[in-house]
Amino acid sequence: ASGRHTLADLIDKYIKEALHGKARTTQEADRIRLAWWKQHLGHLILKHLTPEELQEALPAIAASGRGNGDTSIRRHVTALSAALQAAREWRWIAGTPARELKLPPEPRGRLRYLNPEELARFLEAVRRSRNPMLAPAVLLSLSTGMRKGELLALTWDCIDLERGHVSLMNTKNGSNRGVPLTRQAVEVLREYGRVRRLDTPLVFPKANGQGGAVLRRAFLSALKAAGVADFRWHDLRHTCA
């Protein structure tokens, strides 16, 4: 029976039985990527799938406007490779054709961080922001290097101000980790936490309490006021490091 399985059969089984082991954000992204493969090559018999057929499909990923072209290709192939590896374990195929693909090179990593003068100007602008969440959110990011998604999912029960410690649950790699806080971050959080909302456990909630706050406008305004260019929220992690 395994000789008649199509790529679509594999993708359906993989999503149902194996994808749940990955981090939630990865699951959502890989579902979309695997749906692309299913739509374009799902009819092919898995046992006869060749590297050439996969290689010929790669330009269509970039042409479909799915994010950054080269990066999107690599991520689509990574998602497919995981499914093909599962097929090997299920003995549906003997080897994985994705291993022989020629992929676009990895881009050089972007590394932007604030120098001491920029940081001082930016923190001053952050403190003056009309959004009361911006200063504690920025200082928490700078203090811990946590990702924006982790920050916006953070709940008060994960913060121990007495010990100056934050517990991050279900991080991107699927694990939990504890992070120490700087004295400045503790002071700002203590002040910010004096008045907490009772309708949500989130530290930085939206006005309706459903999900994390949108801090983009306040963040961009602070950057403009500080005269800081070409800087994204994720770069706070680099500055922390």
Image (spheres, helix red, strand yellow):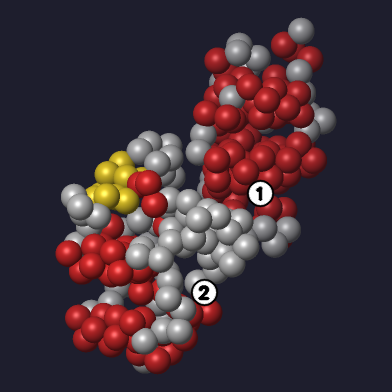
Among numbered discs 2 and 1, the one appearing first in the sequence:
1
**Identity of the amino acid at label 2?**
Arg
Instruction: Please state the horizontal and vertical placement of residue 24, each as a whole percent of the image.
Output: 55, 40
131 with respect to 65 (left or right):
left
Query: Is 163 rendered above or below residue 229?
Result: above
The residue under the point 31% across, 64% down is 189
The residue under the point 59% across, 39% down is 27
Quadrant location, the N terminus:
top right
**Identity of the amino acid at label 1?**
Leu
Instruction: Please state the horizontal and vertical placement of residue 208, each as a whole percent of the image.
Output: 62, 63
* Spatial separation of the CA atoms under disc 2 and disc 1: 34 Å
| Residue density around tag 1, few if under 14, some if 14–19, many if 20 or more, within 10 Å | many
Instruction: Please state the horizontal and vertical placement of residue 225, each as a whole percent of the image.
Output: 40, 92
Q: Which residue is mark 2?
A: 216
Query: Is 218 rendered above or below residue 18?
Result: below
76 with respect to 4 (left or right):
left
Q: Which residue is mark 1?
A: 58
The residue under the point 43% across, 52% down is 154
Considering depth in this image, is 82 or 210 the residue closer to the camera?
Answer: 210
Considering depth in this image, is 129 or 36 the residue closer to the camera?
Answer: 129
Considering depth in this image, is 12 or 225 the residue closer to the camera?
Answer: 225
Q: Secondary structure at mark 1?
A: helix
